[in-house]
């Protein structure tokens, strides 16, 4: 009997893999047999992920690339062997409403969160389409499904990622390549945990953030990685154009 959710013989590109959700995805993909290209603009963080994967007997290589740089992403795609999996996770956040979100803030988030995902799809999806197989997994957010308070720029960009993913799935449905996105709620990422640690009452700050979710807690990066594994594996062959919400019930009453 075949072991489910194996990625043996597949090559995967995982962006934003130096920390948080991206790191958890890279580690899980490697543990399930994929050869992983760890992509991050932070060389030290990326190397730490690669070292961890290799220490666990996995296969990983590092590529130091800023996904907002279209030329660099295209160059990476040309340099790598054909890949079957793209997990586009690189993203940044911003806290603010209209009064304290500058145009430069929106541009900065758009460059990474939207153009970065677009650049990766533009670079890697054509090869998959030509070979008529592959899975593209874009990291969106519950903030791409419902608006989130004080996250004007972030929410705007994540709605764009959801729309981009659905458009790709619709336009290329006949090619054998699947395009999906994951929409996490609150997750214990370095960004979130730093904000909690810097608050006057970290314990209360955690409760406040977790309180948006019916589960009463924030997700672990590994829980999001498990969803990415499902979407990367052959077992999800009937899934394309989806926005998989892992939000602890946040959106249940919306």
Image: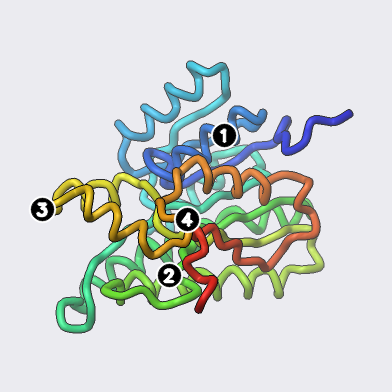
**Nearer the observer, 120 or 205:** 205
Q: Give the CA distance from mark 2 to mark 3.
A: 26 Å
Query: Disc 4 marks which residue?
Result: 215
> Which secondary structure lies at badge 4?
loop
Q: Is the C-beta separation of discs 4 and 3 under 8 Å?
A: no
> Which secondary structure lies at badge 1?
helix
66 over 82 or under it: above or below: below
Q: Residue at x 85, y 31 (%)?
A: 2
> Which secondary structure lies at badge 2?
helix
> Which secondary structure lies at badge 3?
loop
Is residue 119 in sight in this rendering? Answer: no
Measuring from the top left, give residue 17's x and y in whole percent. 43, 41
Measuring from the top left, give residue 198's x and y in whole percent. 14, 49
Q: Earlier in the sequence, mark 3 or mark 1?
A: 1
Mark 4 surroundings within 10 Å by alpha-carbon count, few (fewer than 14), some (14 through 19), many (20 or more):
few
Query: Disc 3 marks which residue?
Result: 200
Front label number (2 vs 3): 3
Q: Residue at x 61, y 31 (%)?
A: 35
Measuring from the top left, give residue 14's x and y in whole percent. 51, 44
Front label number (4 vs 1): 4
Q: Earlier in the sequence, mark 2 or mark 3?
A: 2
Q: Quadrant of the N terminus?
A: top right
Query: Disc 1 marks which residue?
Result: 28
Residue 197 is left or right of residue 227, and the answer is: left
Query: Disc 2 marks which residue?
Result: 143
Front label number (3 vs 1): 3
Is residue 253 in sight in this rendering? Answer: yes
């Amino acid at each position: 009997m075949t072991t489910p959710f194996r990625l043996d013989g597949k090559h995967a590109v995982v962006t934003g893999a130096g920390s948080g959700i991206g790191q958890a995805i890279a580690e899980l993909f490697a543990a399930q047999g994929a050869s992983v290209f760890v992509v991050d603009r932070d060389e030290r963080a990326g190397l730490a992920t690669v070292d961890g994967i290799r220490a666990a007997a996995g296969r990983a290589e590092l590529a130091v690339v800023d996904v907002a740089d279209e030329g660099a992403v295209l160059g990476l795609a040309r340099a790598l062997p054909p890949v079957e999996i793209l997990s586009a996770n690189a993203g940044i956040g911003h806290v603010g409403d209209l009064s304290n979100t500058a145009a430069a803030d929106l541009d900065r988030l758009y460059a990474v969160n939207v153009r970065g995902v677009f650049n990766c799809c533009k670079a890697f999806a054509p090869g998959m389409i030509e070979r008529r197989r592959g899975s593209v997994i874009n990291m969106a957010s519950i903030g791409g499904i419902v608006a989130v308070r004080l996250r004007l720029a972030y929410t705007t960009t994540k709605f764009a990622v959801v729309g981009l993913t659905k458009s790709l799935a619709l336009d290329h449905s006949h090619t054998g390549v699947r395009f999906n996105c994951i929409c996490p709620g609150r997750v214990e990422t370095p960004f979130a945990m730093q904000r909690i640690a810097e608050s006057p009452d970290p314990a209360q700050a955690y409760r406040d953030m977790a309180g948006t979710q019916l589960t009463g807690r924030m997700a672990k990066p590994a829980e999001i990685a498990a969803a990415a594994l499902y979407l990367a594996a052959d077992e999800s062959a009937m899934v394309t154009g989806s926005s998989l919400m892992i939000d602890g019930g946040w959106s249940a009453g919306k």
